[in-house]
Image (cartoon, helix red, strand yellow):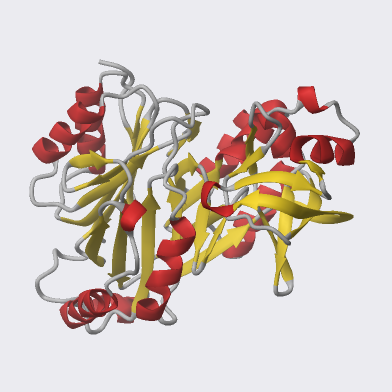
Amino acid sequence: MGPQPVAAETIVRRAESVERDTAGAVAEIAAALGPGPFALVMLFVGRGHDLAAAGAAVKRHFPGDTVIGCTTAGEIGVSGYLDGAVAAVGLPLSHFRASVLVIDDVGRFDGAPVAEVLRMRGALASRAPSWVNEFAFMLVDGLSMKEDRIVAALAPALGTTPLLGGSAGDGLSFERTFVLADGAFRQNAAVVAFIRTACRVKVFRFDHLVPTGQRMVVTDADPERRIVRELNAEPAARAYARALGRDPDQLSAFTFAAHPVAVRVGDRHHVCSIQRVEPNGDLRFLAAIDEGLVLTLAEGRDILSHLEESLAALAPGGPPDAIIACDCILRRLELEQRQAMQSASAILSRHRVTGFSGYGEQMNMLHVNQTFTGVAIFAPSEASSAGQPASGAPAAA
């Protein structure tokens, strides 16, 4: 057995395990989360774990509980950033209700079943009529390239209910990414949890990047594959490197993390991260791209001070009960390059963050990159928790 699991004793249950044996890791997570019943359990599984064993262990240790999750490009546990571990969040039935929509074969996805989503949300409301706080949490195959289509299709059924989520990862391999639903890890799939709670929630997104005055126009692209062939009518990698004053042969993931490009939507910029340079000099992106888009080079503020300030601003009176977060792999790479992972972990742990690093983040109708996206969950007031449904477990003290 590896080190003992770590758990946090709050309304939202959180746990991590660095046990390398997958079945053992899930067993430690279950023990650390404690007894249910849970409205929802979220499991973030690091690179190197046996997914079949993880699925079997989930069925064994969480019978009767709804469990969703995904593979990652790094985990955020109770102690901060992890690698190759398992992190988890448990939402007890005492304060939460959840319904889950599984979308198989997102490659053929042509629109969310709006009527089904509305029925699911209506059923949630009837099960917890005195709880008025809602949000939707989505996990999607990070190599499917269908995030934009899914969030756009869900929007009509969500109305003003905020949606957040992340794209499953596979370290820096970008080979195979999976979503967990119904005890099985699935490729080319997505899962959306609709959550209603007695707790106050705040969905947020932030990044530490500032647009510069340097711009490039996409003059040739393959939108379906998220590939840009030309910027400013010259080969894409060469044009990007020229803008940075770099050798095109020296471009790397660390370069893309330190020098992202952004697209202006409305009154703010959204980062569209570059995944890699193709052998022919094309640039492959992690977000939607198309001809005619104007890309603006961005530069970063100090990522550590920005992280601390942004998380503190969510709750001036002190940290929320928990934060569930989706963090871009490129932010993690920047922290690694700056040798700041330990300091960042301390900040995340202090602010009670749990989640994962992935290949992109979803916020309402947008799929973006290089952001820290999440939901802060606050303990309910005495009045709001007093009206919980009779079918739920007693409220935690």
Q: Is residue 98 left or right of residue 261?
A: left
The correct choice, above or below, for 286 with respect to 275 in the image is: below
Q: Is residue 94 left or right of residue 261?
A: left
The correct choice, above or below, for 152 with respect to 1 in the image is: below
- Visible in this render: residue 44? yes
Q: Is residue 286 left or right of residue 335?
A: left
Q: Quadrant of residue 14?
A: top left
Q: Residue at x 56, y 36 (%)?
A: 345
Q: Residue at x 57, y 53 (%)?
A: 223
- Visible in this render: residue 300? no
Q: Residue at x 14, y 43 (%)?
A: 62
The correct choice, above or below, for 251 with respect to 240 in the image is: above
Q: Quadrant of the C terminus?
A: bottom left
Percent of width and height locating residue 5: 31, 30
Percent of width and height locating residue 220: 71, 51
Percent of width and height locating residue 20: 31, 19
Q: Nearer the viewer, residue 276 or 117?
A: 276
Q: Quadrant of the N terminus?
A: top left
- State how many labels appear: 0
Q: Quadrant of residue 156?
A: bottom left
Percent of width and height locating residue 368: 58, 55
The furthest residue to the top? 1
Q: Nearer the viewer, residue 140 or 304?
A: 140
